[in-house]
Image: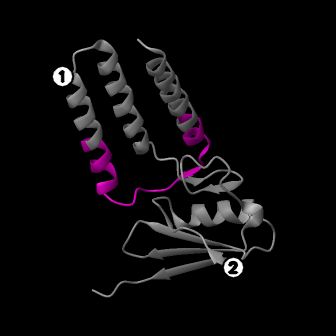
Amino acid sequence: MDIFTGLFGAFTIILYAYLFLLKKELVFVAKRKSIFSIVAPLAVAGFIAISQFFSETLDEKIKGLFAALLILSYLINGRGMTEDRFVTHSLDNRGIKFTKIDRVVLFQDTKEKVVRINFFKRGLRGPLMKFSDSIEEIANFLKKNLKEGTPIDVITQDKKS
């Protein structure tokens, strides 16, 4: 095994440790955007693993395994809310602190079980996140953790059939 393979393996192990620690810190975990965000990394990782399986040296097979694991790390969903910030991306370790949030909007269709959250920072809208938790739980959590005086708008809507 050459030095690049060892470094690549160490990087992959550190990445997984970081992602699992971040996921453990999340109080509310955001839902995935679509089925494509699950299928695409699985397909790419499978292709890499299968193509490297037919390589001749053990070093190339190990590199292929680490490459597939690196692609699969995308499936570890690290988006959501911690005690003090919104985490909009798994690899963004800073997130957006609740103290910098100007306003939060919670939206739920009464027929859907998904709560959509949007927040505003310095007048700019942040990314939309979806949660499967109840709107009451999320609103209480935000009320407790946002800076005092931050408006929380709760919108519910009946869908017309």
The magenta-colored residue range is 20-43
Residue farthest to the left, as pictured: 54
Foreground mark, 2 or 1, reads 1
Q: Name above or below for residue 61 compared with residue 85.
A: above
Q: Amino acid at mark 1?
A: Phe
User: Residue at (29%, 37%) from the top-left corner?
Assistant: 45
User: Residue at (69%, 51%) from the top-left corner?
Assistant: 83
Q: Quadrant of the N terminus?
A: top left
Image disc number at residue 159: none
Q: Name above or below for residue 34 compared with residue 60.
A: below
Dot 2 lies on which element?
loop
Q: Quadrant of the C terminus?
A: bottom left
Q: In the drawing, does residue 135 fall left or right of residue 148?
A: left
Q: Amino acid at mark 2?
A: Gly
Total number of numbered discs in the rendering: 2
Residue identified by numbered label 1: 54
Q: In the drawing, does residue 59 fall left or right of residue 151?
A: left
Residue 37, percent from left and from top? 34, 54
**First along the sequence among labels 2 and 1:** 1
Q: Is residue 38 magenta?
A: yes
User: Residue at (67%, 63%) from the top-left corner?
Assistant: 142
Residue identified by numbered label 2: 123
Residue 112, percent from left and from top? 38, 70
Dot 1 lies on which element?
loop
Residue 136, percent from left and from top? 58, 66
Cα separation, mark 2 vs mark 1, equals 54 Å
User: Residue at (65%, 54%) from the top-left corner?
Assistant: 95
Q: Nearer the viewer, residue 120 or 151?
A: 120
Q: Nearer the viewer, residue 125 or 161?
A: 125
